[in-house]
Amino acid sequence: MTLRDEMFMVSQGINPENDEMFQTVDGEIGINYDAHGVAKSQQLDQLLNLLDHGISKDHDFYTAPFEVPADVKAGLASALGTGGGTAYKDGLAVLTSGYKEKIQDSGVKHVFINDVFSGLKRPLQEAYPQYQFHLLSEQKAVLEGEASKADKQQ
């Protein structure tokens, strides 16, 4: 299996080491998180640039929901230009806003590292304490937990 295959498996909720599935965030919750997948060339450089300098107002910065309900996926795919109507999760990382926020307005809150690169989580968290780093396999607990807390406060 190639590295790209392993990263894709994680994006689909499968641990490539043992083929066990992990739970992904529910689309009804994930749609409330603005996200940007770091999945193209020079991914580590792209990620570090975003973490160091933030989002440049001088360049287009494309986002999509972290996840969406299955019944709206097809319609969003064509509207947003992503294969599944969601941010790409098959790369090194996915950056998200906080719950019901936009990345361009409030900035990046969560950085989900593809489990294939789990060794990067700790050094990145130490280098960039202003962000919350997680593994992609932790998405359900992190995002649904934050949404639940926010909804209780309202």
Image (cartoon, rainbow, N blue to C red):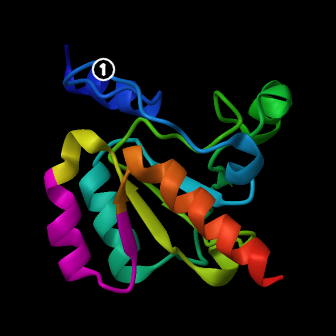
Give the percent coordinates (x, y) of residue 46. Answer: 34, 59
Query: Identity of the amino acid at label 1?
Result: Asp
Q: Which of the pair 62/6 is nearer the observer?
A: 6
Residue matched to label 1: 5
Up-down: is 44 above or below 137?
below
Residue lying furthest top:
1
Majority secondary structure in the magenta region: helix
Q: Which of the pair 116/64 is nearer the observer?
A: 116
Q: Which of the pair 142/101 is nearer the observer?
A: 142
Give the percent coordinates (x, y) of residue 52. Answer: 33, 80
Position of 144 compared to 29: left or right?
left
SS state under label 1 = helix
Q: Decide whether residue 127 is among the magenta residues.
A: yes
Give the percent coordinates (x, y) of residue 30. Answer: 67, 50
Identify the residue at image location x=61%, y=57%. 144
Q: Quadrant of residue 84?
A: top right
Q: Decide whether residue 8 is among the magenta residues.
A: no
Give the percent coordinates (x, y) of residue 96. Answer: 55, 63
Q: Which span is picked out in magenta?
A: 119-133
Identify the residue at image location x=58%, y=64%. 145
Identify the residue at image location x=47%, y=40%. 89
**Other residues around mark 1 within 10 Å, as few (<14) / some (14–19) / many (≥20):** few
Position of 73 compared to 125: left or right?
right
